[in-house]
Image (spheres, rainbow, N blue to C red):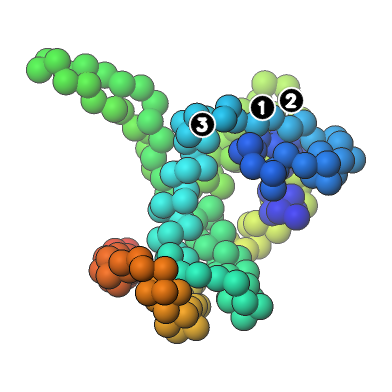
C-alpha cells in the first residue's frame, strides 16, 4: 500500500473505472480504512487530468516505454520509484496555474504562482489550517521523517543513482521489448529517439 508515503491521512480515493479499481476486494479494504471512494466518469479522460499528465512527465520520462513483467524488472522499478518519489516531491519545484488573464492584444495568458516543491505546498496548507484554528494536515512523525530525508539527501547524487537504475532497466528490457514489437509488427523506431531526448533533458537539469 502507498498510504505510508503520504504525510497526511488519506480520506478519499479517486479512481478510474477499471476492474483493478472497482472490485469487491478494494472496496472492502477501503471500507476497513474508512476511506471514501469516488470514480471518474466513463470515457471522460479529463476527469483524471492530473493523473494522466503524470503518465507522461513522470512514468514515461523516468521508466520509458519498455515491457516490464519479470521479478528483476519489478525490483528495479521499486528502487526507481523510491528515489523518484524523493526527487520529485522534496527537491523539484513546480508551478501551478492560478488564473487566466487577457492581454491588450486579446490573447489569453495563463498566470502561474511561484515555484515550490510539492512538500512546501503541503506545509503551506498545513500552516494555513493551523493558523485558522485547525489541527493541520501533516502528521508529526511524517514531518520528522521527511525532514530527515531532506537533510540526508544530496540531490545531485540522487539524480546519478536514478540514472544508474534507468541504465540497468534499459539493459534488461530493451531487447525483449523490441523483439515482442517486431513479432507484433509494431514500429518501435521512435523509442530510441525519445529516450535520447529524455536523457538530454536530464543532463540539462543536472547542470
The CA distance from mark 1 to mark 2 is 5 Å
Q: Tell me the element at label 1.
A: helix
Note whether residue 142 is visible: no
Q: Quadrant of residue 106?
A: top left
Judged from this view, the residue extending furthest toward the left is: 105
Query: Which quadrant is home to the N terminus?
Result: bottom right
Q: Nearer the viewer, residue 152 or 118?
A: 118
Residue 156's quadrant in the figure? bottom left
Front tag of 2 and 3: 3
Q: Quickly name the residue at label 1.
A: 129
Determine the residue positioned at 43% across, 65% down: 65
Q: Position of 204 compared to 124: left or right?
A: left
User: Which residue is labeled 3 in the image?
Assistant: 43
Instruction: Locate residue 21, reporting x and y percent.
Output: 70, 43
Q: Please determine whether, in this image, residue 179 is positioned above or below residue 29.
A: below
Query: Around disc 2, counting alpha carbons within 10 Å, would you say few (fewer than 14), some (14 to 19), or many (20 or more)?
Result: few
| Disc 1 and disc 2 in contact, CB within 8 angstroms | yes
Residue 180 visible somewhere in the drawing: yes
Residue 177 image point, x, y percent? 45, 75
Q: Position of residue 114 (x, y in %)?
A: 37, 37
Marker count (numbered): 3
Amino acid at each position: 500500500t502507498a498510504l505510508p508515503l503520504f504525510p497526511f491521512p488519506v480520506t478519499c480515493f479517486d479512481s478510474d473505472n477499471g476492474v483493478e479499481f472497482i472490485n469487491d476486494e478494494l472496496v472492502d479494504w477501503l471500507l476497513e480504512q474508512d476511506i471514501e471512494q469516488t470514480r471518474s466518469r466513463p470515457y471522460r479522460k479529463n476527469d483524471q487530468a492530473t493523473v494522466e499528465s503524470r503518465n507522461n512527465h513522470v512514468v514515461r520520462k523516468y521508466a520509458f516505454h519498455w515491457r516490464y513483467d519479470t521479478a528483476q524488472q519489478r525490483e528495479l522499478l521499486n528502487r526507481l520509484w523510491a528515489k523518484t518519489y524523493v526527487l520529485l516531491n522534496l527537491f523539484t519545484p513546480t508551478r501551478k496555474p492560478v488564473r487566466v488573464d487577457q492581454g491588450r492584444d486579446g490573447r489569453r495568458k495563463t498566470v502561474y504562482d511561484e515555484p515550490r516543491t510539492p512538500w512546501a505546498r503541503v506545509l503551506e496548507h498545513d500552516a494555513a489550517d493551523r493558523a485558522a484554528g485547525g489541527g493541520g494536515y501533516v502528521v508529526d512523525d511524517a514531518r520528522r521523517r521527511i525532514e530527515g530525508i531532506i537533510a540526508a539527501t544530496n540531490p545531485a547524487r540522487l539524480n546519478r543513482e536514478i540514472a544508474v537504475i534507468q541504465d540497468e532497466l534499459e539493459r534488461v528490457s530493451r531487447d525483449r521489448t523490441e523483439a515482442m514489437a517486431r513479432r507484433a509488427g509494431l514500429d518501435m523506431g521512435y523509442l530510441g529517439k525519445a529516450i535520447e531526448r529524455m536523457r538530454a533533458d536530464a543532463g540539462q537539469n543536472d547542470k
